[in-house]
Amino acid sequence: MILPRTPQTTAAVAAHYNDLDAFYREVWGDHVHHGYWATGRETPAEAAEALVDLLADRLALRPGLAVVDIGCGYGETARRLAASRGVDVTGFTVSDAQAAYAATKPASGVDIRVRDWLANGLPDATFDRAYAIESSEHMPDKQRFFDEAFRVLRHSGRLGIYAWLSKSGPRPWEVRHLLEPICREGRLPSMGDEQDYRAMAEAAGFHVESVLDISDQVRRTWAICLRRVLGKIATEARYRQFLLERSAENRVFALTLVRLLAAYRTRSMRYCLLVLRK
């Protein structure tokens, strides 16, 4: 497990997404997650939706299922799944800014709540499916993340996780220059590898159905984001002002974009979809 030099808390995660709220939406859109290029011809918006659709297929979503979105961002994934698959989605975010934006786009079958997943307060065996798209990384207690998902799922329920993972046995320079700074700058309390996730899932009681590595299909996300951010810096004064503002703790994420692109290209980092069954 990769740990940042400076411990990261849930409050720091919330502040990260609150501070960068407008920038995330302007640079990438309402989906706060990677895009998936199955053919390579998709637009960024199509790729972001393709990632959601791949998850829906792997979880076998069908009308009437109760689904929980762990770390729902702006609720765009929840809205797409409610509309396209006929499921009812309850989403959790720790960001007030994300929840406020989600409230401007209400949708049938979607309920967005500002609440920490590790203290979700849900009854046992409430949901048929659960998913976490790039949010498990932000959990300070990853074992409890899995334990809570297992608890709230019904028998035979499935959990889908899109996760940023470290390669197995990264070299010291990869940890020092890429993985540890990505954790620290991206507000990740830790970054596990595939074996860490398998072990925690099984300790919670899950059976690991599949692990799909789609690193090569998603890494284009960061090249696009970096290019767009550089364009914004060149053309919009408020981007330059934010980067120069010493009190803006999360301005360092601009540098993290470079690290993420390098981490994928050197294969120091992996991006996987794990499907688990209770």
Image (tube, helix red, strand yellow):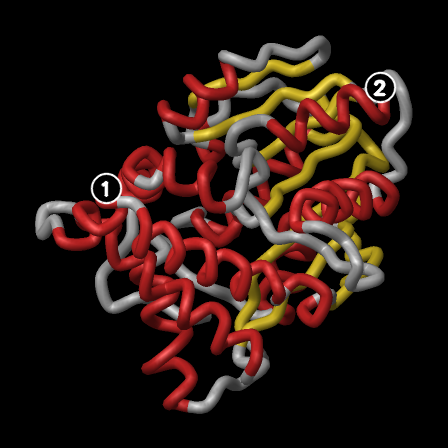
- The residue that disc 1 covers is 238
Viewer-closest of 142 and 38: 38
Left or right: 226, with 7 as reference point: right
Mark 1 and mark 2 lie on one chain; the one further toward the N terminus is 2
Please tell me which residue is depicted at 58% across the width and 81% down the height of the picture. Answer: 267
Callout 2: SS: loop
Tag 1's secondary structure?
A: helix
Q: Is residue 49 visible?
A: yes
Quadrant, the C terminus:
top right
Tell me if I can see residue 278 in this picture: no
Q: Position of residue 34 (x, y in %)?
A: 61, 52
- The nearer-to-camera label among 1 and 2 is 1
The image quadrant of residue 271 is bottom right
- How many numbered badges does the structure rendering display? 2
Pick whichever, 151 or 267, lies toward us: 267
The structure residue drawn at horizontal position 87% and vertical position 43%, both measured from the top left corner, is 57
Which mark, by number, is residue 110?
none
Snapshot quadrant of residue 156:
top right
Q: Residues within 10 Å of mark 2 (few under 14, many from 20)?
A: some
Residue 22 rendering spot, x and y as whole percentages:
37, 34
Q: Which is nearer the eye, 244 or 98?
A: 244
Please tell me whether residue 27 is drawn above or below residue 90 in the rendered image: below
Which x, y percent locates residue 148? Answer: 57, 36
- Tell me: 52 left or right of 8: right
The amino acid type found where label 2 is placed reads Gly
**Residue carrying label 2:** 86
> What residue do we see at 49% from left, 32% from top?
117
Marks 1 and 2, how far apart at CA: 41 Å
